[in-house]
Image: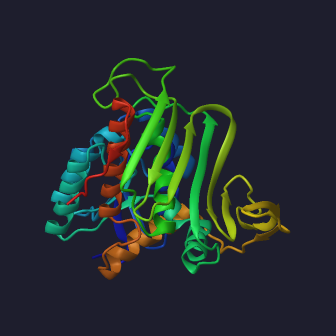
Amino acid sequence: MADKIQIAILGAGRWGTHLVRNFLEHPQAEVVAIVDPNPERLAALQQRHALDPQIFSTDWAAVLERPEVEAVAIATPAVTHYPLIETALKSGCHVLAEKPLTLDPQEARKLCQLAEQQQRHLLVDHTYLFHPAVARGREVVQSGDLGELRYGYAARTHLGPVRQDVDALWDLAIHDIVIFNHWLQAEPIRVEATGQVWLQQHPLPLNPQGLADLVWVKLTYPSGFQAAIHLCWLNPDKQRRLCVAGSQGTLIFDELRAEAPLSIQYGQFDPQPLAEGQSRFVPMAERREVLTLEAGEPLRRVCDRFLHCITTQTAPSLSSGWVGAKLVNILAALTQSLNQGKPIDIQELT
């Protein structure tokens, strides 16, 4: 292996450009190819970073045949992930894939098994798992400082962008689900989703009613803990908020509070007896504790982890292919619930 890992980046859209920047700046990586079917995107990247025009291509198959390419970062539409990742793994490349890993749980499982057979690392870019607030939040939840965990809720809303390849469920819910799973160290066993379609009502294989613009999600975990998630890409009231409520306090991750995104709101009720069998519940003094976080860009940490796994031959654990596959399985169950109008018990992905 060369001193620097030779990496190709497939996809030069919004997220692909962030990957290009991070890998160009990384001392352990050398970007040897950037692939996108849109020449205008490639030209914009070439001008922005003053790169050698020879590294740009519209032919991903030819790039993956190049023997010097050791690793591939894939930031293309989700529907293209399976053939691209499969080809990259069979070509002997390590793969960093944008979320979701695929749109089908069985395809995701096959990719994980293929990575193991090829002895190549497959890591999924669930960026929030590398966010300092999410890492610190897991410590708080697991420490017991919140008391008995009671329920969770999240809101992820904005006014665009509106995707045309997946609905708001697949675009947005994966972030909050991965955080809840990480904090609770568990996965939901039962899910439910309802939604509304306004903009794109044409039927698709996954979405016979069209692409949902608004989705309400309910997750039930083995302990009985439940989480509710509100998702919408047609809401000008932008929200990025996730909370876990316990008997002693509530952990709040509000991404839009840039100076203090993670805090604990302490407060509980003091039951005061009124008469036999009756009480009134008086709120006790509340206080808010802002938690100190480490510095660092989450996506840079994703790139660090990917390159570290390759150089040290260490299997990824925090955001491995199997973590991504299990999330695809959850989203598929939520889609089934959305289409059928009933709760769905999740079948284990093996």
3, above or below 203, in the image: below
Left or right of 151? Residue 100 is: left
* Residue 88 quadrant: bottom left
167, above or below 85, in the image: above
Residue 96 image position (x, y, % from top left): 35, 59
* Residue 24 in view in this figure: no
Closer to us: 19 or 220 = 220
Q: Pick out the residue farthest to the right.
A: 285
196, above or below 21, in the image: above
Write the residue at 77% across / 62% down. Answer: 259
- Quarter of the image that includes the C terminus: bottom left
Residue 103 image position (x, y, % from top left): 30, 43
Write the residue at 52% across / 56% down. Answer: 21
Residue 3 image position (x, y, % from top left): 36, 78
- Quarter of the image that includes the N terminus: bottom left
Q: Pick out the residue farthest to the top.
A: 202
Q: Pick out the residue farthest to the front.
A: 276
Closer to us: 162 or 62 = 162
Left or right of 11? Residue 60 is: left
17, above or below 195, in the image: below
